[in-house]
Image: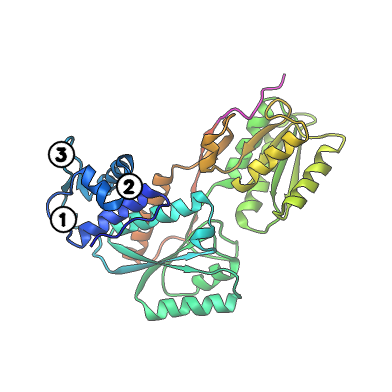
Amino acid sequence: MIELPHRLFLATQTAASIRRGIESGAWEDYLPSERRLCELLQVSRPTVQRALRLLAKDGWIEIRPQRCARLKRRKAARRPSGQLVGLVLSESISHMALHANLAVSEIRAHLGGRGFTTEILVCQGQSARLQQRKLGELLGQNRVSACVLLSASRELQQWFSAQPVPALLLGSRHPSVSLPSLDFDYRSVCRHAAGYLLKKGHQRLAFLTPDSDVAGHLASEQGFLEGVTQYGRGNAQGLIVRHNGRPQQIIARLDALFDSGRAPTALLVSTQEYVFSVILYLLKRGLKVPDAVSLIARDSDYFFEKVTPAITRYAVALDSYTRLVSRLVLQMVEQGYLSTRPHFIFPRFIAGDTVKQLR
């Protein structure tokens, strides 16, 4: 019996469904035809084709033009199935932003290709003590090989740093924590963004960011101010505008900013969920992007690819990112530890059309 994929992120889910079919022995030497897979999994042919390419990348199948895909023997280096990796999330998958949800699905698919099973534990809306008790039960009742923490709180990071099970933190690591981590180099990103805007002739810049002690936000602020100092000339000005994430406060902060005597000509916006709110605010105020105000998004989002003008932003190739996560987890399980030196990724800069060259 083959498990049908969920409708969200169909290519990844379809690849996972086919892989589980292979593992269960549903097929021996060859997969069914693409048309038959469409019927079995109730998805379109392009979705099946993309799923097959994902499986081919992970070494599960060999794609043969005009013929059924051939199953490949698993490489001896792959881990046997049954090893468990715990994925500790700060919110449920259904409430995650699109890019984060897709990242979790891809991570699970890549780890599955390495022979691991994954179990998700959501730590949301609970006291630190209750979260730690649930995690202790997970570790005590299961033979967990490693844990992957996504945007974990400082308390959870500290708790895991004292546990015997190796853990990899995805996101910003607090200074008091000694866990191995993988994060985007937000300091360098924001330094680059400030320099790019200044070289385009903008002298009054503002960085809109959540008011948070999260390490990534603090590093972003530091990099932005460094960029203004390093690349600015004469009267160059860089303002940090913090908000609590609520629409009313974001509007109030922007009102105060643009009602001031020296309103910025360019904005850097942290966290993709606020970008469209800022653009709509500017339009309502009669400020067109980029003619009146230039804009750069520190992060990227699936929907940024669907709008015009194209948003200037920084983006990471999801497949490369999730493969790196899988490789680090494998190293951690085989060695029993990872270096606590943080691993950083510098996202690719996408110039877009939301930054105007000033004279």
The overriding secondary structure of the stretch rendered in magenta is loop
Query: Comparing marks 2 and 3, which lies closer to the viewer?
Result: 2
Residue at figure coordinates x 56%, y 78% from the top left: 130
**What stretch of residues is rendered in magenta?**
351-359
The correct choice, above or below, for 307 with respect to 335 in the image is above
Q: Tell me: 32 left or right of 314.
A: left
Label 2, label 3: how far apart the Cα atoms are: 19 Å
In the picture of the structure, the residue carrying the numbered disc 2 is 43
Label 3, label 1: how far apart the Cα atoms are: 15 Å
Residue at figure coordinates x 63%, y 58% from the top left: 214
Q: Earlier in the sequence, mark 2 or mark 1?
A: 1
Can residue 77 be seen at all in this image of the molecule?
Answer: no
Q: Tell me: 61 left or right of 190.
A: left
Give, as a three-letter code, the residue at label 1.
Trp
Q: Secondary structure at mark 3?
A: loop
Label 2, label 1: how far apart the Cα atoms are: 19 Å
Q: Earlier in the sequence, mark 2 or mark 3?
A: 2
Which percent across, then down, holds residue 270? 64, 46
The correct choice, above or below, for 322 with respect to 259 in the image is below
In the picture of the structure, the residue carrying the numbered disc 1 is 27
In the picture of the structure, the residue carrying the numbered disc 3 is 67
